[in-house]
Amino acid sequence: SVSEAGERSVFNSSSCDFLELILDITRNDVHAALEDYVEATVEGHQGDAMQEESARRVEKSVWFQELPPILTLQLQRVRYDTTLHAAVKVHTPFAFPATLHMDRYLEIHRDQVTESRKKVAGLRREMAVIESRLHILKHYCAPGSQLTAEQAVPQHESLAAVISLLQQTDLTSQQGDIGSCVVLLQARMQQVVAESVHLEEQVASLQQQCNATYAHLQQYTY
């Protein structure tokens, strides 16, 4: 780890045995969670009280010297909700491959992987921005709606329901206005579907780039 206080940097290192790793399930897939586990930055960290000045920034980097015969990954499915002031279960989907390649986390590959980690971190930040927009399209809640995140529906399905309702409405005197609304809503629905497809393709492309970065490291597997 590297601790920075003002212009001073302090390097610390330690080693320990392990049999399991606790992963953040909100990262959506096992490699994203592992990347968070092995690389982390803490801003505003307070150092030891005996030090002359407290560290303001700490960077953690973890490298495995040897992997156990059986590796246990514990998924952290519980988080503390600051609004409810209670622990709540996280239902985020979590993807993992049939074969898990661990080469990128081994110390013997440290020199060739260090720059790759930075590249993948940048790709994942870009992916997070796109996924945030995609989440809005996939989990739509109208302003003032009382729906929870679990009850929210894709925006194009919500638009389709409104269109269907308008088409079934028998208001002879307002057929022209209703027809215009239907046309506008159908156009918007097509835009939403097209945007969702485009965003999904972007996410898939970025994920492929992440995977390709470590494609040459596939010796240590589970």
Image: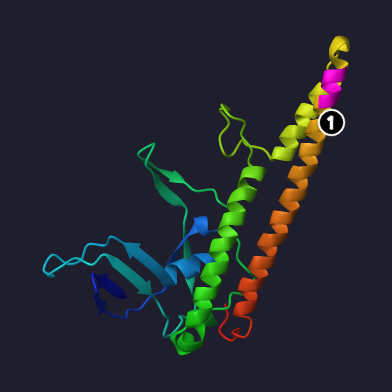
Considering only vertical position in the picture, is 168 above or below 34? above
Determine if residue 158 is in view: yes
For residue 68, what is the image quadrant?
bottom left
**Which amino acid is tagged 1?**
Val
Considering only vertical position in the picture, is 188 above or below 144? below
Q: Is residue 179 magenta?
A: yes
For residue 144, what is the image quadrant?
top right
For residue 207, what is the image quadrant?
bottom right
Residue 26 screen position, x and y as percent:
51, 55
Task: Give the magenta-colored segment's residue range.
Answer: 176-180
Residue 143 screen position, x and y as percent:
58, 29
Q: Nearer the viewer, residue 58 or 92?
A: 58
Residue 192 screen position, x and y as percent:
74, 43
User: Which part of the image, by quadrant, shows the C terminus?
Assistant: bottom right
Q: Residue at x 59, y 84 (%)?
A: 217
Q: Residue at x 63, y 41 (%)?
A: 139
Q: Please give left or right for residue 7 compared with residue 72 in the image.
A: left
